[in-house]
Amino acid sequence: MDVFWFLPSNGDGRYLGSDKGVRAVDYDYLRQIAQAADQLGFGGVLIPTGVTCEDPWVVASSMIPVTRNLKFLVALRPGLTSPTLAARMTATLDRFSDGRLLINIVAGGDPVELAGDGIYLGHDARYDLCGEFITVWKRLLAGETVNFKGAHIQVDGAKLSFPPVQEPHPPLYFGGSSEAAHHLAAAQLDYYLSWGEPPAAVAEKIADVKAKAAAQGRQVKFGLRIHIIVRETAAEAWHAANALIAYVDDEQVRKAGEAYQRSDSVGQQRMANLHKGNKNHLEISPNLWAGVGLVRGGAGTALVGDPDTVAARLLEYADLGIDTFVLSGYPHLEEVYRVAELVLPKLPLNSGGQRRKAKPVVNLSPVGDTGQVDLRRKTG
């Protein structure tokens, strides 16, 4: 499996719904997380998009020179830019990163945010726009001169001067739970991402997308976007989960619920229905906890438990056909180390996701010694 981490360009901290322990999102902090994920063996990082996020393309570009192997799953929102400009941006970032770019197509779902970006299309029309956008984008990156006239997009004589490193284009990821989203994924996407719903619900979505793709002679791969709360014991993990929402009050939950209700995203509605605003019944499936979604939009569930249990739950999703996992945890810098140390060794990682190991050095010098350390010391 491929295991990715998350760059919290929309904010980070030790608690949800509180400014206690909140951290400023700046270049230095995001660089620390990216470099840790790179060194610890994560295959890539998801960089989110939205009005509350730093621009994902600029963030990804800034991380190229400070990482070695890490791939960047960068959000691309049809409707905010033309497919020709997006294709040029894609080719440039793919070349400058030496083929480390992945694309996450985001249709959007919050009408307030969409209106702020000048997008007034209805739900299904946005997916039609995505389909036209991807068609032009793919053809350009494949080296074609493109003439295209659709309901939403028209280009004449469009072409690229520089090709991407990855042929015919960087892989396309996409998430959505509606019928329109499943049709788009089956027809044009490489990876379908689901948020962390109970395994039976994820299995239903996989089966639907797989069947729709097969009907068109295509195959789609599958991924899961989910948070992780892992500790050495189950009791410690559940304590950490409860501590994460210690400052979330009923008014915050109510306001978040209002925002979820105005969204036409079926995936967001499914996330909200998992907890229904009830802080007392959050374990919706064994070790699957919906507390994050009380006040956080998007992926709202976490796997909670000791290392063996969390790894086992991830492998249950893998048995359904998931081969890419996009993980995260609060705060993201500390948790990237914790997940790497406690969970990754228990998973069958792709060859590209193996941790680069330095020769271990043990400093056994007592405090107050000369400070001279034998770097040749070997551990037993």
Image: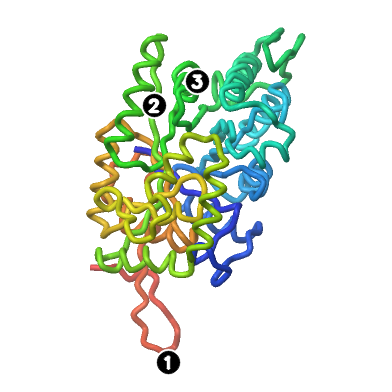
Q: Secondary structure at mark 2?
A: strand
Q: Secondary structure at mark 3?
A: helix
Counting residues from the start of the chain, the first of labels 2 and 1 encountered is 2
Question: What is the three-letter code of the residue carrying label 1?
Answer: Gly
Tell which tag, 1 or 3, sits nearer the viewer: 3
Foreground pick, 41 / 9: 9
Counting residues from the start of the chain, the first of labels 1 and 3 encountered is 3
At x 46% / y 46%, what residue is drawn? 299
Question: What is the three-letter code of the residue carrying label 2?
Answer: Lys
The color scheme shown is: rainbow
Could you tell me residue 45's position as x and y percent?
51, 45
Question: What is the three-letter code of the residue carrying label 3?
Answer: Leu
Q: Say which residue label 2 marks.
A: 221
- The quarter of the picture where the N terminus appears is top left
- The relative height of residue 309 versus residue 113 in the rendered view (above or below) is below
The image quarter in which residue 155 lies = top right
Foreground pick, 238 / 17: 17
